Image (spheres, coloured by chain):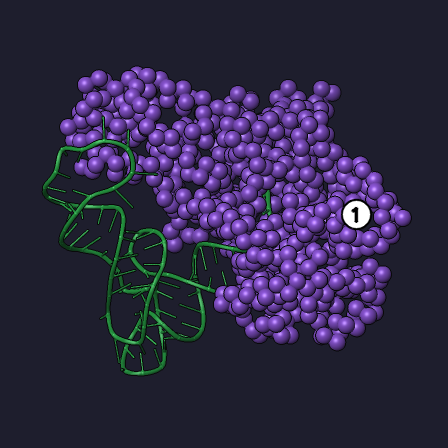
Chain colours: A purple, B green
RNA sequence: GCCGUUGUAGCUCAGUGGUAGAGCGUUUCCUUGGUAAGGAAGAGGUCGUGAGUUCAACUCUCAUCAACGGCUCCA
C-alpha cells in the first residue's frame, strides 16, 4: 500500500498504481467529474497517471490556475487534431496555454487559413470533444521518437527533440492525434464543452525574424457554455474601456497621417489632464528636494557616444540631421543632458543627493509594429529625474523613489501591478549589458535589499535590466491584456564614469556618484492611456477636463447660469454652460456620455431660491444645494484628489 | 522590422464591374421643455494614396501609406 497525504494533512492508504482520478472517485463522483489534473509531490501530473510511491496529492479543477492551464493545453492538442483534419500534412511547432486560453503555431505550407476555416475547425473540435477521447501518455525512447517524426517529415518536432534528454520523452495521443509533449493533460476531451477560436496571427519560428513565419491560431475553451459567454461579454466590456476608443470619444488625443505614426496630438481635453499630472509631479518633486531643469530636444552625436546609448539604441533613434559636418540626434532620453548639468558646476559631497527633474520630450523611433495607441508612441514626455548620490545614500534615495510611486498609486487607486526587479543576463555581458560583472551583482543586491527591507512584494526577472544597471519596473496591463512598464526606478553605475562625473568626498578625494534614473509617472502618453482605461474614462474631479456642466432648463435661466459660471470659474473650476435649445433630458444624456463629474440643473426653483440642483456622473440626482455649499464641497473634492 | 486582417460621410458601419447608402453627429427652422435621445428640413464622400487591367474600377491586379491582431523589440 502507498500513503497519500491530502492538502488538509489527512493521510490515506491506496493500492500502488492507483491514480488521482481513482482517488477522487473514492471521495465523490461529482468531484471526479471535475478533476482536470493533480499535483503529485508538487508536480502537476495527469489525473489518470498511476501513482506508485507515497505522495502528497492535490486535485486540480477549473478553480485552480494549474487546472485551467492544463485544460487549455489539452485544448491546444484538440485544436491541432481538428486542424490536421482540415489541413492534412500541417506541421506543428508548440501549443502552450497562455493567460487567457491557448495557441498552437504551425506550418501550413503554402496554404492560408481564413476566418471561415476557424469556424470549421471550431466545429470539428466540438465533434472530437464529444467523442470523449482519452489523452494517453506514452513514454518513448529518443530514437523511436526521432524515427516517428522522421517518417512524418516533421522538422519542427525533430528540432524540439534535439534538446530533449532520452528517458524523459513522452508522447500524448488523443483520438487520431499524437504529439510530442511533456504533458500533463486532462483525462479526456469530453470535458471541453465550449470552444472559441479567437485569432489568427503570423509569427516567426522561435521568434527569430530570420526564420520562417508560422501561423498561430489562438483560442479559448471552457468547461461550460456559460463561462464562455461571460468571457466574451467581458471582452466586449474591455473593448469599451480601450483608451484608443475613449480617447477619441472624450477628445483627449488623436493621430493624423500627416503628422506621423506614433506621434499623438493632444487635444484641449488631453492637455488639461497633462497639466494636472504635471502639477502633481512638480509639487511632489519639489517637496522631495528635486530641482527642475529644462534641456533641449536635440544634441550632438558625441553626447550619445559618451553616454554609450548610441551603439545600443541607434536603430530606435530618429536618424540624425547633419549640420556643418556635425550630426545632431533628437534625444531619446534625458539622462545625458542631466549629466551635463551635474558636471557644469563642481560638486561636493555636501551637494548630494543632487536631484534633477524634467518633463523631458523624447523621441524614439519605435518599430512600426510596436506602436499601440498612447501606450507605445514615438514622441514621449517622460516624468524623468536623475538622482546623483553616494553609495551610502543609495538606500534612502532608492527607497524614497519607491515611496513616491506608492504615493501616486494611492492617489490614482492603482492596485493591480507587479513590481519587477529586472536583472542582467550574465551571458550577455559586453553585448546587451556593460561588462562589469562585479558591479552588476553589487547593485542588484543593493536594489534587492531595498525591496526586502521595505517589505515590498516583487518578482525577479533576468535579462530585463537597462544596459547600465538593474532596475525596478512597475508592470501593468492594458484593458485588452497587454503588459506594459508603467513606471521605472533604475540604478546606473556606468554613466557616471563615462561622463567623468565626480564630487569631492569627505576625504577631499574625487568620487564617482551613483545615478538613479526614475520615472514614477512613466510618460504622459502611457500614463494617461493607462488612466483612461483604469477609470474607464470617468476621471476623478481633479483630473476631469470639464468638471462642471451647467444645464439651464430653458433660455430664461441663462442669466443665472452665466453668473453661476462666473462663480465657478472664480473658484478655479473648469465649467461650461449647455445653452442649446434642447430639453433637459437630452442635455443630461449628452453630458453623462462625456462623463463630466458634475451637472448643475438650473430651473425656476433654483433661481428663486439661489440654489443648484446637483447631479453627479454615475450617481444621478443628488438634490439641491446653495451655490456656496456646492463650491465649497467640490473645492475640497478637487484639492484632496478624491476618487469619483 | 516581419506575417495576417482592415481602410466607404465627423463617428459606427452596410453595399455593388455601370461614377454610393443607413443610424448617430453637424447646420437651419420650429419647440422653452424638470433629471439619459422633442420635431422638420438641409449640408456633407474624386469609397486611404498611386499605378495597371477594362468600353467602364469604390469593386479586379500590383505597389504604397496607415490602423488593427500577433511575433520581435522597449534606454
Specify whether A521 is left or right of A60.
left
Query: What's the residue at 68%, 38% (across, down)?
Result: A459
Total numbered labels placed on residues in the image = 1
| Residue A7 percent coordinates (x, y) | 76, 39
Which residue is found at the position 71% from the left and 29% from the top? A452
Quarter placement of the C terminus of chain A: top left
State which quadrant residue A516 falls in.
top right
**Residue A381 percent location from the top left of the image:** 48, 39
Q: Residue at x 58, y 72 (%)?
A: A86
Q: Please give the name of the residue rendered at 71% of the width and 75% of the height, measured from the top-left corner.
A: A153
Q: Position of residue A190 (x, y in %)?
A: 64, 59
**Relative height, residue A408 to residue A1 (above, below):** above
Viewer-proximal residue among A275 and A222: A222
Q: Is residue A12 above or below residue B15?
A: above
Left or right? Give the position of A298 relative to A553.
right
Which residue extends farthest right?
Answer: A1
**Residue A94 in view in this figure:** yes
Give the chain letter at badge 1. Answer: A
Q: Left or right: where does residue A562 sit relative to residue A327?
A: left
Disc 1 crowd, CA 10 A, few/some/many (<14, 14-19, 20+): many
Residue A594 vs residue A366, the one in the foreground: A594
User: Is there any visible trace of residue A520 in the rendered image?
Assistant: no
Say which element carries label 1.
strand
The residue that mark 1 highlights is A40
In terms of depth relative to the viewer, which is nearer, A188 or A395? A188
Q: Position of residue A413 (x, y in %)?
A: 51, 31
Amino acid at each position: 500500500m502507498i500513503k497519500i497525504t491530502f492538502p488538509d494533512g489527512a493521510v490515506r492508504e491506496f493500492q500502488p498504481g492507483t491514480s488521482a482520478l481513482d482517488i477522487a472517485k473514492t471521495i465523490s463522483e461529482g468531484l471526479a467529474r471535475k478533476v482536470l489534473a493533480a499535483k503529485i509531490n508538487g508536480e502537476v501530473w495527469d489525473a489518470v497517471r498511476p501513482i506508485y510511491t507515497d505522495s502528497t496529492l492535490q486535485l486540480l479543477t477549473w478553480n485552480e490556475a494549474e487546472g485551467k492551464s492544463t485544460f487549455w493545453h489539452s485544448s491546444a492538442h484538440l485544436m491541432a487534431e481538428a486542424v490536421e483534419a482540415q489541413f492534412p500534412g500541417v506541421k506543428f511547432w508548440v501549443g502552450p496555454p497562455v493567460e487567457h486560453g491557448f495557441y498552437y503555431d504551425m506550418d501550413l505550407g503554402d496554404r492560408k487559413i481564413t476566418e471561415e476555416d476557424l469556424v470549421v475547425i471550431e466545429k470539428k473540435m466540438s465533434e472530437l470533444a464529444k467523442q470523449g477521447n482519452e489523452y494517453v501518455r506514452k513514454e518513448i525512447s529518443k530514437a523511436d521518437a526521432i524515427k516517428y517524426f522522421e517518417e512524418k517529415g516533421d522538422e519542427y518536432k525533430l528540432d524540439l527533440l534535439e534538446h530533449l534528454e532520452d528517458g524523459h520523452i513522452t508522447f500524448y495521443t488523443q483520438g487520431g492525434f499524437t504529439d510530442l509533449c511533456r504533458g500533463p493533460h486532462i483525462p479526456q476531451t469530453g470535458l471541453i464543452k465550449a470552444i472559441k477560436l479567437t485569432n489568427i496571427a503570423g509569427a516567426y519560428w522561435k521568434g527569430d525574424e530570420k526564420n520562417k513565419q508560422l501561423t498561430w491560431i489562438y483560442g479559448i475553451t471552457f468547461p461550460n457554455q456559460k463561462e464562455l459567454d461571460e468571457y466574451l461579454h467581458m471582452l466586449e466590456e474591455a473593448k469599451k474601456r480601450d483608451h484608443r476608443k475613449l480617447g477619441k470619444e472624450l477628445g483627449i488625443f488623436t493621430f493624423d497621417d500627416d503628422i506621423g505614426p506614433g506621434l499623438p496630438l493632444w487635444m484641449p481635453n488631453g492637455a488639461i489632464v497633462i497639466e494636472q499630472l504635471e502639477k502633481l509631479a512638480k509639487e511632489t518633486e519639489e517637496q522631495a528636494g528635486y530641482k527642475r531643469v529644462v534641456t533641449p530636444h536635440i544634441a550632438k552625436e558625441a553626447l550619445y557616444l559618451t553616454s554609450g546609448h548610441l551603439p545600443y539604441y541607434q536603430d530606435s533613434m530618429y536618424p540624425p540631421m547633419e549640420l556643418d559636418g556635425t550630426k545632431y540626434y533628437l534625444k531619446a532620453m534625458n539622462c545625458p543632458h542631466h549629466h551635463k548639468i551635474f558636471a557644469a558646476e563642481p560638486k561636493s559631497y555636501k551637494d548630494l543627493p543632487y536631484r534633477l527633474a524634467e518633463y523631458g520630450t523624447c523621441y524614439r523611433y519605435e518599430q512600426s509594429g510596436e506602436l499601440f495607441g498612447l501606450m507605445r508612441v514615438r514622441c514621449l514626455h517622460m516624468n524623468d529625474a536623475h538622482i546623483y548620490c553616494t553609495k551610502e545614500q543609495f538606500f534612502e534615495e532608492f527607497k524614497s523613489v519607491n515611496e513616491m510611486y506608492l504615493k501616486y498609486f494611492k492617489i490614482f487607486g492603482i492596485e493591480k501591478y507587479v513590481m519587477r526587479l529586472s536583472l542582467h543576463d550574465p551571458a550577455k555581458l559586453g553585448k546587451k549589458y556593460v561588462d562589469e560583472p562585479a558591479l552588476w551583482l553589487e547593485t542588484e543586491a543593493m536594489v534587492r535589499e531595498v525591496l526586502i527591507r521595505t517589505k515590498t512584494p516583487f518578482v525577479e526577472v533576468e535579462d530585463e535590466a537597462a544596459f547600465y544597471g538593474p532596475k525596478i519596473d512597475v508592470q501593468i496591463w492594458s484593458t485588452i491584456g497587454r503588459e506594459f512598464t508603467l513606471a521605472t526606478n533604475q540604478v546606473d553605475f556606468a554613466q557616471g564614469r563615462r561622463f567623468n562625473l565626480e564630487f569631492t568626498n569627505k576625504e577631499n578625494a574625487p568620487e564617482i556618484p551613483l545615478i538613479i534614473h526614475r520615472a514614477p509617472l512613466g510618460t504622459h502618453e502611457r500614463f494617461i492611456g493607462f488612466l483612461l482605461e483604469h477609470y474607464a474614462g470617468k476621471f476623478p474631479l481633479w483630473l476631469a477636463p470639464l468638471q462642471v456642466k451647467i444645464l439651464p432648463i430653458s433660455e430664461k435661466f441663462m442669466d443665472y447660469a452665466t453668473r453661476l459660471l462666473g462663480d465657478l470659474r472664480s473658484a478655479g473650476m473648469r465649467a461650461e454652460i449647455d445653452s442649446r435649445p434642447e430639453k433637459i433630458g437630452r442635455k443630461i444624456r449628452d453630458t453623462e456620455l462625456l462623463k463630466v463629474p458634475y451637472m448643475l440643473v438650473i430651473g425656476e426653483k433654483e433661481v428663486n431660491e439661489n440654489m443648484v440642483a446637483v447631479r453627479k456622473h454615475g450617481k444621478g440626482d443628488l438634490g439641491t444645494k446653495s451655490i456656496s455649499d456646492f463650491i465649497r464641497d467640490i473645492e475640497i473634492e478637487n484639492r484632496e484628489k478624491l476618487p469619483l
